[in-house]
Amino acid sequence: MKSKLIEKEEVKYKLTALDRCDRCEAQAYVSVSGVSGELLFCGHHYNKVEDSIKEWAFKIIDEREKLEKNSLTGSTN
């Protein structure tokens, strides 16, 4: 029986631990770009405004999956 080598695709994230939520200064996991500029949100605050933001945003980078990934691996970043 042949063993298969499974390659993990490394995900490249745009937001880092230095990016902070514009509402509360927690780590930002979502970047929203609109005509007038960019807003950064933590997961909590993006959840609150997600529906209304989608009406005017033209680019949304949502990296909230890092929260789940970090809780599963025990990573602090």
Image (spheres, rainbow, N blue to C red):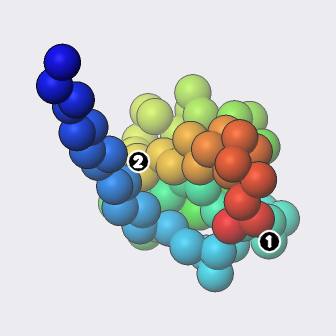
Res 12 seen here: yes
User: Residue 37: x percent and y percent?
Assistant: 43, 69
**Residue 56 or residue 68, whichever sits in front:** 68
**Residue 9 or residue 47, whichever sits in front:** 9
On the rendered image, what quadrant is the C terminus found in?
bottom right
Q: Amino acid at mark 2?
A: Ile
Query: Is 44 on the left or on the right of 51, as rendered?
Result: right
User: Residue 57: x percent and y percent?
Assistant: 40, 46
Instruction: Please name the residue shown 51% across and 49% down the image.
Output: 63
Circle 2 residues within 10 Å: few <14, some 14–19, many ≥20 = some
Residue bearing mark 1: 25
Instruction: Please name the residue shown 59% across and 49% down the image.
Output: 66
Query: Is 52 on the left or on the right of 4, as rendered?
Result: right
User: Residue 22: x percent and y percent?
Assistant: 70, 67
Mark 1 vs mark 2, CA separation in Å = 19 Å
Res 22 seen here: no
Sequence order check, earlier mark of 1 and 2: 1
* Residue with the most extreme bottom position: 18
At mark 1, the secondary structure is loop
Instruction: Please name the residue shown 44% across and 33% down the image.
Output: 55
User: In the rendered image of this protein, does residue 27 appear above or below residue 17?
Assistant: above
Q: Amino acid at mark 1?
A: Glu
Residue bearing mark 2: 60
On the rendered image, what quadrant is the N terminus found in?
top left
Using the rendered view, name the quadrant where residue 41 is placed.
bottom right
